[in-house]
Amino acid sequence: MCRFEREHKYENAWVRQGILFGALLGLIHIGYNLINNLAPANLTVNGLLNNSLLFAVVIFTSIAGYIAARKTGQMKLGTYAGLCTGLLSIVIGVCALFLITFAFMGIIRQNAFMLDDFHRSGMKSIDEFIIEDALGATMVGTFLSLFTGGICGTVGGCLGKTLKGW
């Protein structure tokens, strides 16, 4: 195998892992958005849901990084796989969030947590508040997904490279 074929194979390894785990994590984001926006407000369920999503992001980005680095022997490709996973999953999650928000605005308007936050905000329109809430979640989610994807992909990549010979 020539050098170009080897490098191309390595490049594909992190892309494939990023797409696979990013799509799977994106499906989890869709489920999260559905439950978070449409289920009756409950502090216990809400806390469990948020912690579970964070745990899933850590696990999926780490595994993507581990597999990419294990296949290639390059830790940086583990980082790339984690970042790709985080990026694809948040794109899917954000698209789902806005589709759900606009499709189910009537139900979201009745969410007890949303109503409490709206009354404390002082804003005049709950629809505007809901959209701004979704935009805020988009910005925070994007940052956290990329940050976590980079860190966990690197950790997974380090483990994958270290354990490649085992």
Image (tube, rainbow, N blue to C red):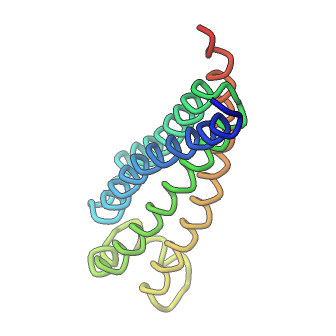
Q: Position of residue 60 (x, y in %)?
A: 49, 38
Residue drawn at 57 percent across, 26 percent down: 71
Q: Looking at the rendering, in which quadrant would you find the N terminus?
A: top right
Task: Give x and y (percent) for residue 122.
Answer: 55, 84
| Figure quadrant of residue 77 | top right
Residue 50 x, y percent position in the rendering: 46, 48
Question: Which quarter of the rendered picture does the C terminus lie within?
Answer: top right
The structure residue drawn at horizontal position 65% and vertical position 57%, both measured from the top left corner, is 143
Q: Looking at the picture, does residue 147 appear above or below residue 161? A: below
Q: Measuring 34% from the left and 78% from the top, which residue is drawn there?
A: 109
Would residue 84 appear left or right of 130 to someone viewing this image? right
Q: Point out residue 10 in the picture as x, y percentages from the top left corner.
A: 62, 37
Relative to 38, is 162 above or below?
above
Up the image or down, 32 lies above or below 110; here it is above
Residue that sits furthest to the front in the current view: 2
Residue located farthest toward the bottom when viewing the structure as drawn: 124
The picture quadrant where one finds residue 111 is bottom left
Query: Would residue 106 be found to the left or right of residue 21 on screen?
Result: left
Residue drawn 44% across the image and 61% down it: 92
Task: Name the foreground residue: 162 vs 94.
Answer: 162
Place residue 139 in its image quadrant: bottom right
- Front residue (pair 116, 46): 46
